[in-house]
Amino acid sequence: MTNDDWPALLTAQRAQLIADLASAAEASAPVELDQSRVGRLSRMDAMQSQAMSQAADSRRHREIRQIDAALARVEAGTFGDCAKCDEPIAVSRLRFAPANPLCLDCAEELER
């Protein structure tokens, strides 16, 4: 991939995440308390499904923020450079997760 390809890829990923958020909005809606309509176990299932959907929405929002930061790095001319050590990030790592701001060594260092 060339440097010119990354903004289009990041923008497409961002658009997909926003579409996913819109389609999942109903699943995150509050669960009604109407016991006559929904049994206790069904309500518990609905609440669990709601919590899982909210967690997925949170992850999508975090990924959108990461993509926005990556697009800002593209504009600044620093995309592809590690935010911690300023060394180039391996292209294979960027292909896997283009919004990733860290090289593998720095990411592993943070996990320790």
Image (tube, rainbow, N blue to C red):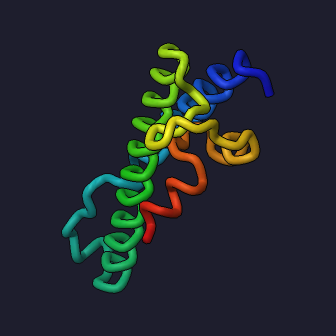
**Residue 46 visible within the image:** yes
**Residue 22 visible within the image:** no
Which image quadrant: the C terminus?
A: bottom left
Farthest-out residue, left: 33
Which residue sits at x=50%, y=30%?
Answer: 70
In depth, the one of 47 and 73 nearer the eye is: 73
Which residue sits at x=45%, y=36%?
Answer: 64
In depth, the one of 60 and 89 nearer the eye is: 89
Q: Across the whole image, how many numbered discs are drawn on residues?
A: 0
Q: Is residue 28 above or below residue 62?
A: below
Residue 49: image location, x then y, percent: 41, 68
Farthest-out residue, bottom: 41
Q: Is residue 79 left or right of residue 3?
A: left
In depth, the one of 103 and 37 nearer the eye is: 103
Q: Is residue 99 left or right of residue 61?
A: right
Image quadrant in which you'd find residue 54: bottom left
Q: Is residue 79 above or below residue 84?
A: above
Which residue sits at x=63%, y=36%?
Answer: 88
Q: Is residue 96 left or right of residue 34?
A: right
Residue 55: image location, x then y, percent: 38, 60
Q: Is residue 8 left or right of residue 17?
A: right
Which image quadrant: the N terminus?
A: top right
Residue 66: image location, x then y, percent: 45, 38
Residue 107: image location, x then y, percent: 51, 56
Which residue sits at x=62%, y=21%?
Answer: 7
Q: Is residue 9 above or below residue 55?
A: above
